[in-house]
Amino acid sequence: MEPSTISSCILTLHKEFAAYTTQRLQELGLSFGLIYFVIYVGKHPDCTPSELTKALHLDWGHSQRSLNKLAEDGFLTKEKNGRSYHLKLTQRGENAFVVCHQVFIGWDAQSLGGLTAQERQQLLTLLQKAVQKKVCK
């Protein structure tokens, strides 16, 4: 049965993305739920847990548990600097950061392979517009 609403299409794509991502990240010992933490710290080295939590719109407790897990598993370090901690990826985290980007690119290529370059760009533009409108409210 084909999804008949935008939200059902998005949910279907999310499930497929989660399965695809999980399969590729398991080799690294990284779960799907931690991918955005690795990407954020990789793009914002030396950020604080507070900055990450706010930027990703997360609950403080969930954020702290996830960061502790990543630190325990050797993906990042939490260095105390004055009254706050600063986050940095370790070499293992840097490797995971690269793989995370490859996963996004690979999934896009696999899932959107039936679209022309123009159709992919149009889809991306419209989705970005919808996201921007939602974020601004």
Image (cartoon, rainbow, N blue to C red):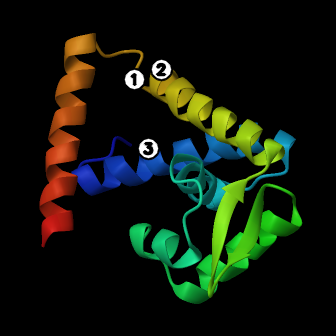
The quadrant in which the N terminus is found is top left
- The residue pinned by badge 2 equals 109
Q: Which residue is mark 3?
A: 13
Closest to the observer, 18 or 128: 128
Residue type beneath disc 1 = Leu
Spatial CA span between label 1 and label 3? 11 Å
Counting from the top left corner in percent of width and height, residue 52 is at 50, 69
Along the line of sight, the residue nearer the viewer: 43 or 133 = 43
Give the mark, 2 or 3, whose residue is nearer the N terminus: 3
Instruction: Indicate which disc, 1 or 3, sits on the residue closer to the N terminus.
Output: 3
Residue 134 lies left or right of residue 13; in this view the side is left
**Residue type at the position of mark 3:** Leu
Residue receiving disc 1: 112
| 67, 120: nearer the viewer | 67
The Cα atoms of the two marked residues, 2 and 1, are separated by 6 Å
Contact check, label 2 and label 1, Cβ < 8 Å: yes
SS for callout 2: helix
Q: Residue at x 56, y 24 (%)?
A: 106
Within-10-Å neighbours for mark 1: few <14, some 14–19, many 20+: some
